[in-house]
Amino acid sequence: MTDQKFTQADWDEVSDNPEWTEEDFRNARPFAEVFSHLAATIGKRGPQKKPTKVSTTLRLSPDVVAHFRATGKGWQARIDQVLKDWVASH
């Protein structure tokens, strides 16, 4: 970060969210009212495309978790695959 100051004109130039007017506030309606067809589905998953996995708690060594997390997004799925491979070979 720098100590550079930005003017209001700078912010106005890049702003995608203009200040609300009194009329905007008067016309505002709750999300659930405007999107009532979506409100009941917020936070709910649709039908599973693949077999559902079982949620569980598993205690792993810190070095194992660090190794897989360092591989980026999907690290838990990679642990799952390693365990599947082990099960298949034993």
Image: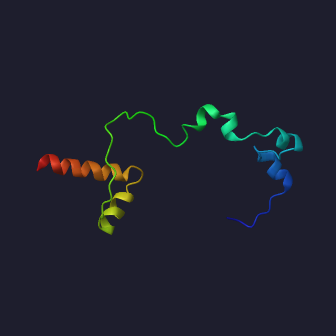
Looking at the image, residue 17 sits to the left or right of residue 9; the answer is left
Work out which quarter of the rendered image holds the N terminus and state it: bottom right
Q: Establish if 66 lies above or below 35.
A: below
Residue 83 lies, in percent from the top left, at 23, 52
Residue 88 lies, in percent from the top left, at 15, 46
Q: Residue at x 45, y 35 (%)?
A: 46
Farthest residue toward the left? 90
Q: Establish if 1 lies above or below 9.
A: below
Q: Residue at x 60, y 38 (%)?
A: 39
Residue 8 lies, in percent from the top left, at 85, 54
Nearer to me, 66 or 26: 26
Q: Residue at x 31, y 48 (%)?
A: 54
Q: Residue at x 84, y 57 (%)?
A: 7
Q: Quadrant of residue 2?
A: bottom right
Residue 64 lies, in percent from the top left, at 30, 63
Q: How many marks?
A: 0
Farthest residue toward the top? 37
> What colouring style does the render use?
rainbow
Looking at the image, residue 24 sits to the left or right of residue 52; the answer is right
Nearer to me, 88 or 27: 27
